[in-house]
Image (cartoon, coloured by chain):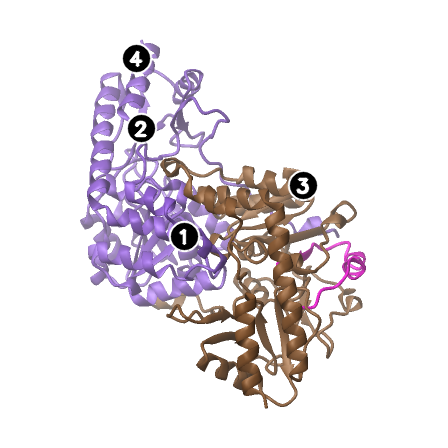
Chain colours: A brown, B purple
Amino acid sequence: MSWRDNLIKIEPYVAGEQPNKTDFIKLNANENPYPPAPGVLKAIESFNAEGLKKYPDANSRELADAIAQRVGLKRANVFVGNGSDDVLALCFRAFFNSDKPVIYPDITYSFYPVWCDMLRIPYETIPVDEDFNINAADYARENGGVVIANPNAPTSIGRGLDFIREILDNNRDSVVIVDEAYVDFGGESAVPLLNEYENLVVTQTFSKSRSMAGMRIGCAFGNEEIISALYAAKDSYNSYPMDSVAIAAGVASVADEEYFRATVAKVIATRDRLSAALREMGFTLPDSCTNFVFAQHSRYRAKDICEHLKTRDIYVRYFSKARIDDRLRITVGTDEEIDALIRELKAYIV
Amino acid sequence: MSWRDNLIKIEPYVAGEQPNKTDFIKLNANENPYPPAPGVLKAIESFNAEGLKKYPDANSRELADAIAQRVGLKRANVFVGNGSDDVLALCFRAFFNSDKPVIYPDITYSFYPVWCDMLRIPYETIPVDEDFNINAADYARENGGVVIANPNAPTSIGRGLDFIREILDNNRDSVVIVDEAYVDFGGESAVPLLNEYENLVVTQTFSKSRSMAGMRIGCAFGNEEIISALYAAKDSYNSYPMDSVAIAAGVASVADEEYFRATVAKVIATRDRLSAALREMGFTLPDSCTNFVFAQHSRYRAKDICEHLKTRDIYVRYFSKARIDDRLRITVGTDEEIDALIRELKAYIV
């Protein structure tokens, strides 16, 4: 018997490569190529750092208020945390305390099984069809909870509210989490359904559409009872998850709706141009509702393309995983970055 | 059967009261009354907020390097996270995977049982003696892990390395966590023992001695295998726990050793003056090795004193908990704040 026997045994999540150099085009982590709103820069620059001697507001109420107001909810319907990974893991902890398996698609965000393993939550995955579509009818079965990323990652496919409604109607007795990390790039948010379904939880993030991946801000929406459970789970782990600077920066981001819309519109325009160019080169890809595309070439192996692009200092994402190892996930960068990518692909694909 | 049946059932941790007003003396959360180092203010003011569009460095290497260098360790021996609550909870997750109970004192940081409950870790508490001293010999028993806060909270008592050594010698087969949240105020750090004991983990925080409670920075020290397990646990939960601003601010804090020492010295001087004044008024209290004192009056009930002080806009901490409900925990504030406290106490205690 040794202390080593009690160490955690776990496969760590592998995120997109972050090369130790600065002069390359990074299209592998679904980051936004544009900076956060100007107000965010000002909020940080003028932040009263003396105040850091005090603990932050435990429940980040100022930020919860700002977010609530934007989406037309009350503060009691909003939870904020240290990135949507933090928020989602707390959701799993707070809502999935059943012996029945939590269900979600086989092709989706790769952190779901990791959290289930960590929290010893049983789970089963349900295959998406050959076009990566989720079939809502497959979710009409006994379960301990449901998680649906909509739009889904890494497939980029977004579905309408009828689809979410069907899943909710089939699951009145489970908490249904709709993970909307990418919703702002063309998805349809389930927030308006919160009035109808008391078992619905919607999560969102500031990392993508608000260009604040470096700041770690995520949120969840739900009815008061749901949100209270989330705060209880948070309080049992870490009373003060968000720092004071992040709270101030988040508030400033929410304040600038115009910049938010303009940035998202730029990303969408570039994405659609990228999608058309890829199709012209012989790629097939679903219509993307996100800030990335999920593309397969008829004649070139995804892994080879990925490796080749790396030699040209362009990083895209390749998953060596069943069903999707013939696909590239390419984040939408600036127009210049995407032009460079298209140029290199055209030179490679003959 | 309803979704409600699977909600988390948990008693949330109750932190020190944070009244919704600004004009009061806050001596109830063990915060530092002085601002962070001037370099921290500059680091935030000049932070390149454009870079927030990218994810932070997942392992906060720049900060881990700075901390490692300061204490004479390698980066591989240092883990940094989002406050020491985050770090400690991850330690419990990473190191306490046994069927045997984790052991710690009955009077100590109140988050330990909360994390055990959350992670379904069995635990047993071991009573401190009537003077709140931990008896190292009590920890010579089978267990799944050991946690010792040194200096301990809320007792304020710090013990020397002989004491820690005895606990370690009795527990070669368990991970022993020494929680040093308050060590800089007069405790003796177990970091030098890391070379001798491969099962030792030491945790520290930037919230107290570095005046950065609002920034959420904590760290752990241990051998490479220990620290790797901690990163694996972190990666399985949240790849990017610390935001980019916090990393930069933390680095700036570590860079100013002189300011750090001067601030700690001021707190210690005020604490010793407060301790003497309290004893003169008929309080008994252990010699504090922390930035707070733990005081009992022979004739006045702690709860009454606490309530009275509140009416004078001075907030101290009272725990309605067995064995310590006759005590006040008073954080060391500025000299002016402590003068005001002493004045009010002198007027109340006749």
Location of mark 3 (residue): A224
**Figure disc tally:** 4
Q: Looking at the image, is mark 4 or mark 2 nearer the viewer?
A: 2
Q: Are marks 1 and 4 on the same chain?
A: yes
Disc 2 to disc 1, C-alpha distance = 33 Å
Provide the residue span drawn in magenta.
Answer: A156-181
Asked if the residue under mark 4 is in contact with the one under mark 3, i.e. CB atoms within 8 Å, the reply is: no
Disc 2 chain ID: B
Location of mark 1 (residue): B48
Disc 1 chain ID: B
Q: Earlier in the sequence, mark 4 or mark 2?
A: 2
Task: Say which amino acid is labelled 3.
Answer: Glu
Disc 3 to disc 4, C-alpha distance = 46 Å
**How busy is the neighbourhood of tag 3: few (under 14 within 10 Å), some, or many (20 plus)?**
some
Q: Are marks 2 and 1 on the same chain?
A: yes
State left or right for residue B189 relative to residue B240.
left
Disc 3 chain ID: A
Task: Say which amino acid is labelled 4.
Answer: Lys
Q: Nearer the viewer, residue B117 or B228?
A: B228
Asked if the residue under mark 3 is in contact with the one under mark 1, i.e. CB atoms within 8 Å, the reply is: no
Disc 1 to disc 4, C-alpha distance = 50 Å
Q: Are marks 3 and 4 on the same chain?
A: no
* Image point (43%, 22%), residue name: B23
Asked if the magenta segment contains residue B76, the reply would be no
Rendered location of residue B242, percent (x, y) = 43, 54
Q: Nearer the viewer, residue B44 or B14?
A: B44
Location of mark 2 (residue): B333
Location of mark 4 (residue): B346
Q: Earlier in the sequence, mark 2 or mark 1?
A: 1
Q: Secondary structure at mark 1?
A: loop
Task: Say which amino acid is labelled 2.
Answer: Gly
State left or right for residue A167 relative to residue A275.
right
